[in-house]
Image (cartoon, rainbow, N blue to C red):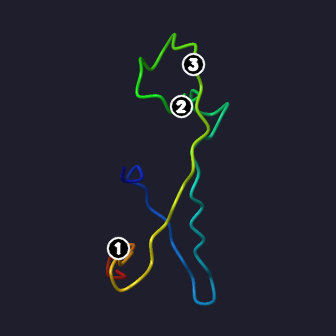
Amino acid sequence: MAPYPTANVFKPGHRIRLDVSSSNFPRYDVNHNTGGPLYGDREYTVATNTVHHSEQHPTQIELPVQPAE
């Protein structure tokens, strides 16, 4: 899933952090991680997040840069 489109100005020396998470409750509804119905599912499963970063499983983040006006 790709992040929602957004725009930020990063000045020299600023850093970018990426957080990987299964949930952002209460901002977004809980993901039950079962593949069942989004609303009304009574079962829950703990999710395990894995970020692969090797030669066999390369990882990248693309950040388009707009030219300064």
Residue shown at 32%/76% (left/top)? 66
Residue pushed farthest bottom?
12
Q: Nearer the viewer, residue 1 or 35?
A: 35
User: On the rendered image, what quadrant is the C terminus found in?
Assistant: bottom left
Q: Secondary structure at mark 2?
A: loop
Identified by mark 2, the residue type is: Asn
Local packing at callout 3 (Cα closer than 10 Å; few below 14, some 14-19, many 20+) is few
Local packing at callout 1 (Cα closer than 10 Å; few below 14, some 14-19, many 20+) is few
Spatial CA distance of label 3 from label 2 is: 10 Å
Residue shown at 54%/31% (left/top)? 31
Vertical side of 55 occupied by 6: above or below = above
Q: Mark 3 sits on what residue? A: 43
Identified by mark 3, the residue type is: Glu
Q: Is residue 22 left or right of residue 52?
A: right
Residue shown at 35%/73% (left/top)? 62
Q: Secondary structure at mark 1?
A: loop
Q: Mark 2 sits on what residue? A: 31
Residue 27 locus on image (x, y percent)? 63, 34
Question: Which comes sooner in the sequence, label 1 or label 3?
Answer: 3
Q: Is residue 33 left or right of residue 69?
A: right
Question: Which comes sooner in the sequence, label 3 or label 2?
Answer: 2
Residue 46 locus on image (x, y percent)? 62, 38
Give the image quarter of residue 65: bottom left
Q: Nearer the viewer, residue 67 or 19?
A: 19
Spatial CA distance of label 1 from label 2 is: 26 Å
Vertical side of 56 occupied by 41: above or below = above
Give the image quarter of residue 14: bottom right
